[in-house]
Image: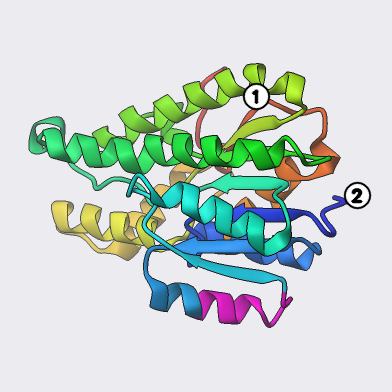
């Protein structure tokens, strides 16, 4: 199936590593123009250099998107680089693990900025550009925990659910403008964050990260963690013109881990 991504102009945030990097890579392979973002300029430069081995159509836009003025500046820089914007993928790392009583108000405020307001600010800034696109699409990256909360991840479980509510609301509100809005819910995927979570589990239980990973994979119906490339293929389909009749979807990419009905 042809995704028709050739020439599409995309901004992928949180793309210096992990899931965002995998999506940026595949978009480039499909012929898109891609602006990448990360808060560590050095790491972002390395990622952009690697991506330029695939295509020269890469714009490198460092910035910490939890700072209120940065999302708008990054969106404008991406649109300036490519003469517009067709695809916005809002992605960021997750809040730290911990129990409810371990977090004070500033920790909750930080989680809201990272896992909710980041999406709000990016989308708000991108809408004028997306309204001028022939195939506009927004994809919020959340987590399978909005369907099946995980122990010791109360910040992520709580705040990411708000982004799902935002996604569903905007899918309705922006449909008259032909702007599709979907969310993708990654499951256990082999990223730096998940590897760190396995080390945290091991430290708490007195085991090893390898043992914790093996035990987890036994719970996944497909028998293994996902790879970033698995996630990227699903994400690129959702933002592509090939998915032109899909909006308001919450797509699990989790190997069957979540077994709830809706």
Q: Quadrant of residue 242?
A: top right
Task: Residue 223: give x, y in percent of width and height.
Answer: 54, 50
The residue indicated by pointer 2 is: 1
In the displayed structure image, the side of residue 40 where residue 187 appears, left or right = right
Write down the region rendered in magenta: 46-56
What is the crowding at mark 1: few (fewer than 14 residues within 10 Å), some, or many (at least 20)? many
Q: Quadrant of residue 243?
A: top right
In-front residue for pair 165/184? 165
Residue at left 32%, top 49%? Answer: 67
Q: Secondary structure at mark 2?
A: loop
Residue at left 22%, top 56%? Answer: 200
Camera-near label (2 vs 1) is 1
Q: Is residue 151 visible?
A: no
The residue indicated by pointer 1 is: 248
Please state, as top left, top right, bottom left or bottom right, where the C terminus lies in the image.
top right
In-front residue for pair 150/44? 44
Task: Residue 186: give x, y in percent of width and height.
Answer: 52, 44
Q: Is residue 55 magenta?
A: yes
Q: CA distance from mark 2 to mark 1?
A: 22 Å
Residue at left 23%, top 45%? Answer: 97
Determine whether 136 is above or below 25 in the image. Answer: above
Q: Is residue 76 magenta?
A: no
């Amino acid at each position: 199936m042809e995704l028709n991504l050739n020439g599409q102009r995309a901004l992928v945030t949180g793309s210096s590593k992990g899931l965002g990097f995998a999506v940026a890579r595949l978009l480039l392979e499909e012929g898109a123009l891609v602006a990448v973002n990360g808060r560590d300029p050095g790491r972002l430069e390395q990622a952009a250099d690697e991506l330029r081995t695939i295509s020269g159509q890469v714009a490198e836009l460092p910035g910490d998107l939890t700072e209120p003025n940065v999302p708008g500046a990054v969106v404008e820089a991406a649109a300036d680089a490519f003469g517009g914007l067709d695809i916005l993928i809002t992605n960021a790392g997750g809040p730290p693990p911990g129990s409810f009583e371990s977090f004070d108000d500033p920790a909750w405020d930080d989680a809201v900025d990272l896992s909710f307001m980041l999406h709000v600010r990016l989308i708000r800034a991108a809408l004028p550009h997306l309204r001028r696109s022939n195939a506009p699409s927004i994809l919020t990256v959340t987590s399978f925990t909005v369907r099946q909360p995980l122990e010791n991840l109360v910040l992520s479980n709580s705040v990411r659910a708000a982004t799902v509510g935002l996604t569903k609301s905007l899918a309705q509100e922006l449909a008259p403008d032909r702007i599709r809005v979907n969310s993708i819910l990654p499951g256990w995927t082999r990223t730096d964050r998940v590897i760190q979570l396995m080390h945290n589990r091991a430290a708490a239980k007195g085991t090893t990260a390898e043992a914790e990973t093996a035990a987890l994979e036994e719970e996944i119906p497909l028998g293994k963690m996902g790879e970033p490339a698995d996630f990227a293929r699903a994400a690129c389909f959702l933002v592509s013109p090939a998915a032109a009749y899909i909006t308001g979807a919450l797509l699990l990419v989790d190997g069957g881990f979540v077994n709830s009905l809706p």
